[in-house]
Image (cartoon, rainbow, N blue to C red):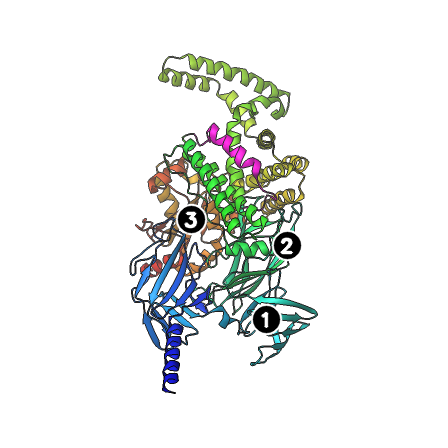
Amino acid sequence: MKTILITLLLTLSAFSVQAREKTIVWEQPTTEFCNVNGDGFFYPAFDVTRVEMKNDETIVHIAVAWRSDYPEYKFKIAKDIYLKVGDERFTVVSADGIELDKFTQTNKDGRLMMTFHFPPLPDDTKSFDLTEGDQKRSIQIKGIKPVEERWQQLLPSYWCNQQGDWKIAFLKDYAIYDCKFWSYKSCDINTKTGKAEMVITNGNDELKVSIGKNHKGSRTITIGNEKGKYKMITSRFLPDYPTKDTRTDFVDNGYKLDTVTVVGWLKDMPEDLSQLKTFDISYTNLFTDKRETVNADLDEQGRFTVKLPIVNSTEFFCDWRRCFVRTMLEPGKTYFMLYDFKEGRRYFMGDDCRLQNELFKYPNKLAAKRIEDGEDLDKYIDYVDSILKVKFAEIDQLSSEHPTLSTRYNSYKKGCMRMQLARDLAQARFITKDKQLTDKARRYAYDNFWTKIDQPYTLHHELSVFLTDYLDDATLNSQSAMETFNLIDHLNDIAANDEERALLSQWNVWKDDAQARIDAEPTVEDKERLAKEIIEANAEMIAKVDKIFSSEKTQKYAKVHTFLNKLKNGLYVLDSLKATPFIKDVWLARMAYLEIDWRRTSLLPEIMDSLRAKVTNPICLAMVEKQNDHYLAIENRDFDKLVLKSSDNLKDLSDGEALLKKILEPFKGKFVLLDIWGTWCGPCKNALSHSTEEYERLKDYDIEFLYLANNSPQESWENVIKEYNVSGPNVAHYNLPAEQQKAIERYLNVHSFPTYKLFDRNGRLLDLKVDAHNLDSLVQFLDKIK
């Protein structure tokens, strides 16, 4: 009996030792909270990939994703980081892959693997936290547990169908299904079996949901009349899809106006981010080369719905102040986007959102750096080519490692990389002396970018910049083969009658003869003397010709034919590059749109008629007509011209200081905020668009708002003032002759536009940097000196 007892004790002892020495491994454990689960590029993302619980230690493996192309993107892990089980702490013993308490960066690929060694945790540990402490910026990853534990939970839980799509979610207050939020009418969960019966409602719609037992993370779920097998999603991103999607095409509606709907939830936002009350989605308008933004209001829970105008499958930038989601959306579809700040979950729901989920998990990254000053352009091409090959190989390698990644993902990623490099190469011309590409660069851009643009053309936002710079370069390179418009060649067309025709003919012969006589003089002084004599002797004829050239008829003729010649030359360049009909339409329409936008005046009817004959795409044409009608309405709008000040009383002044003193004279006793701007200046016009807000904020400070326009045609000048309502009883506008404007700018040392200056009640320039955009700062200063 004693022998049997000893044998039994020895057996139990051996079993006990064997049990303690067995390593427990949690592969891809789940977490309930993480404050470092950013996008992995602009903000760091920490993912616990593996936990090993051994008899003598606990090992935690963490993968870090963060850009490493700038030195300021660094992080450090505190030397006293610890695990917490209940109230008990287990401080780190050592770390591999990182030196504790020292700033470090990820590797060149933007990734870093870290391994932390802690004391052993209690044998019965089912969940623990990893934290640096309770400070605001301390790393905190809480509720780390094996997936087997998470499978037991129904609220919250997220589920994908057998095809791999996120289909439904059950949360504390809502269910998410069919891209909608559903309320619980009833929710009965059997705590013993894990089964559940629910009734969910959305408006007048009601669905019964039955949920079966857990079988290793899978359950049978019946939603209404649809029954299927579903698998719980325990990872931050959807798992790789079970089968490969070999489609190669994207929705192409022929560039017709459509919409796409995005419903979403920014779940559990941190307090600092919840101060932003809108969800912003932006895209580059290919037709105007402008960034368009649509804002959706967030409710108290961070939910939103936004309907976006779209003309084809388009790349979008979603909530770039907070979420940094770059994706592609297709016309006519509805998507649900979940961005969970607490758990780090990022999912798309919808009828066909596989690509969007793949881009969530394996996002686009910047492909290259821009060319540096002084760098040889031809050598830069070799660099671009090597980057293109490396990036394509990386994408193919990723597809090889994850064989079910869709064919569309592979081609879309390559298209993004190609267009990023195309944009960078086209912009590299601005580094060269003559602002043009070399022949080698031009040929490379044509063979590798221009002829390989993905369709539809709205897929990649960088294409818009590439089109602008590449076609501008092609235009410069083709100047010798293009026609030029010279008003001298059209004297018969601008003459109003036979008398003017004879005068212009006489003047044309005379000017050539006069120029030949001046050129024959040996010295500059002699040339200037003779020119003065010739002008004085023919002053009457010159005055008559000047009157013809400055007439409304001549100005209109020149305006029309200058722009039509520009369109003709644009078509010549596009034909030489074998551009598609759609690209031709986009480019011609964009030329017209930008002409209107730059001049801030409508196009003449003859130009619009020519465009209607040349542009076949209705979206392109409608864009130009809408912009043109906008400025036609402005031109016909009445406004208070008392704000437009005459410069007649300044005609005898040329000194900048004297001119400014005279202009400021009527405003003695008031502060004067001077804005030096121009109708050609984009930032100036953007600032003027906020004038009403500026006047309202500063209404109690007795300020005169003085505007001096630089190089601004009269009609454009008046249109901008009317468009942005830059008027009022305390507003004064001057459009001085060029030399007087330059004199004032020299006196005030103006080198950029817009420039703001503030003068006190005695007309003295205050020595401070004024930014009219920063109204809070300006108000604080005015309060001090009021």
Q: Which residue is mark 3?
A: 706
Tell me which numbered mark, 3 or 1, is placed earlier along the sequence: 1
Q: Position of residue 457 (x, y in %)?
A: 59, 43
Q: What stretch of residues is rendered in magenta?
A: 434-460
Tell me which numbered mark, 2 or 1, is placed earlier along the sequence: 1
Confirm whether residue 164 shows in the render: yes
Confirm whether residue 737 shows in the render: no
> Is the residue 221 above or below the residue 38 in the image?
below
> Which image quarter is the N terminus in?
bottom left
Q: Nearer the viewer, mark 2 or mark 1?
A: 1
Does the magenta run of residues contain 472?
A: no
Q: Provide the secondary structure element on which disc 1 rests.
A: strand
Q: Which residue is mark 2?
A: 259
Q: Provide the secondary structure element on which disc 3 rests.
A: strand
Q: Nearer the viewer, mark 2 or mark 3?
A: 2
> Is the residue 656 above or below the residue 113 in the image?
above
